[in-house]
Image (spheres, rainbow, N blue to C red):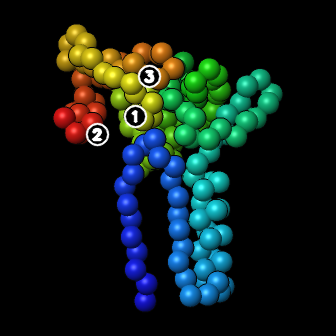
Amino acid sequence: MFKLSIEQIKKEENEEIIIKCHEINNDVLALVNRLKEGESKANSIAGMKGDDIYSIKLKDVYYFEATENKTFIYCKDEFYETKLKLYEIEALVKNLQFFRCSKSIVLHYSKIDFVTPAFNGRFEAKLSNGEKVIISRQYVPVLKDILGI
């Protein structure tokens, strides 16, 4: 029998997992390995620039955009192409601080500095890298729920 505790912290704080156990046995080691494996798989995505393939950490992604039958990964100063469709990316990043903000964009909401109302019920999000992204009217309630307003 064990106790499980989860503590939500501020985004400025470093996340950590602490395992307290009486002995380091195979079960504990298997759990550690699953956590490490899950971290490497779930926290990165492959992106291409020319013929080069990069492993991009999801925490570095600002948004994903589908345009002209291609899907792009936008980071602070760089962008990459991915072969994944936007709906596949949306499933991949589910529960990881991302949400669909328009028909063509999945946005990392922790990269938003501030939002302002725009015309026709839409919002404009200014990201921490200075870029601006439009939140479609259809997805404004989702953003408000995320922001707690």
Query: Residue at horizontal 53%, vertical 58%?
Result: 16
Q: Are marks 2 and 1 in contact (CB under 8 Å)?
A: yes
Q: Nearer the viewer, residue 105 or 39?
A: 39
Q: Nearer the viewer, residue 39 or 71?
A: 39
Residue underneath mark 3: 127
- From the viewer's perspective, is 132 left or right of 37? left
Q: CA distance from mark 3 to mark 1?
A: 9 Å
Of the residues shown, which amino acid type is indicated by label 3?
Leu
Label 1 neighbour load within 10 Å: few <14, some 14-19, many 20+: many
Q: Is residue 129 above or below residue 141?
A: above
Q: Give the numbered dot on residue 109.
A: 1
Q: Could you tell which of marks 2 and 1 lies nearer the N-terminus?
A: 1
Q: Give the numbered dot on residue 146.
A: 2
Q: CA distance from mark 2 to mark 1?
A: 8 Å
Residue furthest right as drawn: 51
Q: CA distance from mark 2 to mark 3?
A: 16 Å
Of the residues shown, which amino acid type is indicated by label 2?
Ile
